[in-house]
Image (cartoon, grey):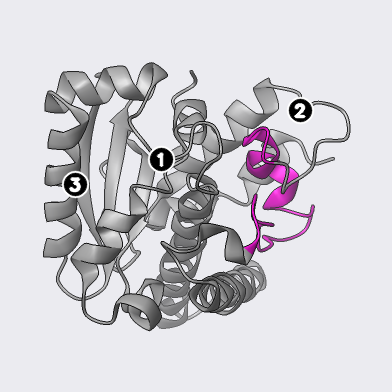
């Protein structure tokens, strides 16, 4: 089994990526602090913990496409099966494959490597491992409609922070939707948490590169690249974002908050 330290050795290039090391440290650290029940495996609807276990992201040598905690069809009718198959199995897999290739190329560079080659590999790492990290959190904070803790108003630590920051869940949704809809071109809307201030706030992330505020970690994301919604919603991004609220797994969000 991979230790948290082993996985984080591979996380260094994520400092240049959209989600940053803080997100992986939160995900893997929270998971390692708890021991899943015997026999529990990714796909068990009873707990989000197995999804966030290090072995679901890293096999000891390289990053891997995480196994979802639900089936591709389980997010219907809010996100369609065909989109999930394409988004997770093709787009996300490509980020993992290309990120690992860039890491391998970087590890093979000699001391006299051309600076332009290094810069190009850094851009590849930023884009692909940023995409891997952001998508991994996106999948892990959604769940099958009707499952306990999925959809509806937030509870626990997440509910407290949202009420404090926005006044109510409805006000949060109004503001978060505006952030998501206003992203120009491709990107993400994120709810991030600052361990220093203990506060949460919203943030727009352009594409999936380094737009992350230092010291803060995303605890909730919605992908607004067109491949995330176009098969079902076409140009109706707002409808897709509104549907997303039915899928939020508040147990996973609280896990990322350490609650």
**Magenta stretch, residue numbers:** 45-71
Taking the spot 56% from the left edge, 69% from the top edge, the residue there is 88
The secondary structure that most of the magenta stretch takes on is: loop
> Of marks 1 and 3, which one's residue comes earlier in the chain?
1
In x, y percent, where is residue 244? 35, 54
Q: Residues within 10 Å of mark 1 (few under 14, many from 20)?
A: many
Alpha carbon distance from label 1 to label 3: 15 Å
Q: Work out whether residue 30 or residue 82 is closer to the camera in this orientation and state it.
A: 82
Taking the spot 41% from the left edge, 70% from the top edge, the residue there is 127
Residue bearing the label numbered 2: 36
Taking the spot 44% from the left edge, 65% from the top edge, the residue there is 79
Q: Work out whether residue 136 or residue 180 is closer to the camera in this orientation and state it.
A: 180
Q: Secondary structure at mark 1?
A: loop
Q: Which mark is residue 176?
A: 3
Q: Nearer the viewer, mark 2 or mark 1?
A: 1
Alpha carbon distance from label 3 to label 2: 32 Å
Residue bearing the label numbered 1: 151
Taking the spot 48% from the left edge, 18% from the top edge, the residue there is 259
């Amino acid at each position: 089994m991979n230790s948290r330290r082993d996985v984080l050795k591979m996380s260094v290039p994520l400092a240049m990526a959209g989600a940053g090391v803080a997100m992986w440290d939160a995900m893997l650290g929270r998971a390692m602090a708890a021991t899943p029940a015997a026999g529990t495996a990714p796909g068990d609807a009873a707990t989000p913990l197995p999804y966030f276990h290090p072995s679901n992201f890293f096999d000891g040598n390289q990053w891997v496409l995480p196994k979802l905690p639900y089936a591709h069809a389980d997010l219907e009718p809010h996100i369609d099966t065909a989109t999930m198959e394409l988004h997770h199995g093709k787009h996300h897999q490509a980020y993992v494959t290309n990120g690992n290739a860039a890491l391998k190329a970087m590890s093979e560079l000699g001391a006299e490597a051309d600076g332009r080659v290094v810069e190009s590999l850094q851009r590849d790492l930023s884009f692909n491992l940023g995409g891997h990290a952001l998508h991994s959190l996106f999948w892990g904070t959604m769940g099958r409609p009707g499952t306990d803790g999925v959809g509806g108003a937030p509870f626990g630590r997440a509910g407290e922070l949202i009420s404090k920051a926005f006044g109510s869940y409805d006000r949060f949704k109004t503001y978060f939707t505006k952030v998501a809809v206003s992203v120009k071109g491709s990107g993400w809307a994120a709810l991030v948490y600052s361990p220093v201030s203990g506060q949460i706030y919203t943030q727009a992330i352009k594409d999936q590169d380094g737009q992350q505020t230092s010291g803060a970690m995303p605890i909730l994301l919605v992908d607004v690249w067109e491949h995330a919604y176009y098969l079902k919603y076409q140009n109706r991004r707002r409808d897709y974002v509104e549907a997303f609220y039915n899928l939020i797994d508040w147990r996973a969000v609280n896990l990322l908050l350490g609650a």
